[in-house]
Image: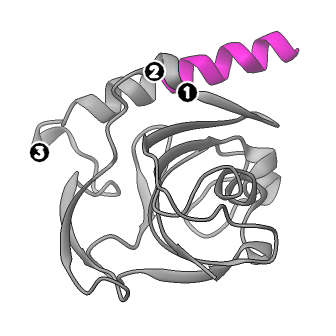
Amino acid sequence: MLNNIKHSLFICLLALAVFSCTKPAPQEQSEAAEPTTTATESTSSANQAVAVTVPFEVVDSSAVEDLGGGIKMYVIERGSGVIPETGSNVVINYHGMLTDGTVFDSSFGKQGVMDFNLNQLITGWQVALTAVETGSKIKIIVPPEMGYGAQGQGQIPPNSTLIFDIDLISTY
């Protein structure tokens, strides 16, 4: 069973790498999916605009880290700030997708940065965000049991593997 899960996650990761490196033609996109976008974000600490393209591109799939519990992480850019701890607040931008590429939520270019307490986030985010330095940009794959599980959430169907691009802007 564990080997089947590992194999499924590898296939998802491989599909993710292919998906991240290609843009479908406009006629191929489903109505539910948002196109790859370039957003301008403004951080309160720097007050400067930075162009960010989401979803983040996976350049080297062999550099994917296994964080345990089926969570996979690829560091797009490693930050140099503090590593968040349980109970920390984090300011982030994020982009959430299903494995078929359907975007279910994104703060890039719409609502701007978000401020969360780590204790309020899904387990997959808690594990990943406490594994990287502030200033990091990461892509994570979160299995259902570390996400929203059998109940799902809003546009996220039950038992969905989730893919997130996260820009960890600050920690306090």
Instruction: For marks 3 and 2, give the CA distance.
Output: 26 Å
Residue 90 point in image, percent of width and height: 60, 76
> Horizontal placement of 147 versus 16: left or right?
right
Q: Which circle marks residue 64 in the picture?
A: 1
Which of marks 2 and 3 precedes in the sequence? 3
Magenta segment: does it hold 5? yes
Residue under numbered circle 2: 61
* Quadrant position of the N terminus in the picture: top right
Toward the viewer: 138 or 172? 172
Is 49 left or right of 136, judged from the image as shown? left
The quadrant where residue 141 appears: top right
Give the amino acid at mark 1. Answer: Val
- Asked if the residues shown at circle 1 and circle 2 are in contact, with their CB atoms under 8 angstroms apart, the answer is yes
Whether 18 is drawn above or below 107: the answer is above
**Relative image position of residue 164 (x, y in whole percent):** 51, 52
Mark 3 to mark 1 CA distance (whole Å): 29 Å
Magenta range is 1-13
Which of the numbered marks, if any, corresponds to residue 55?
none
Residue carrying label 3: 26
Q: Residue flagged by tag 3: what amino acid is it?
A: Pro
Residue 169 screen position, x and y as percent: 45, 71
SS state under label 2: helix
Q: Secondary structure at mark 3?
A: helix
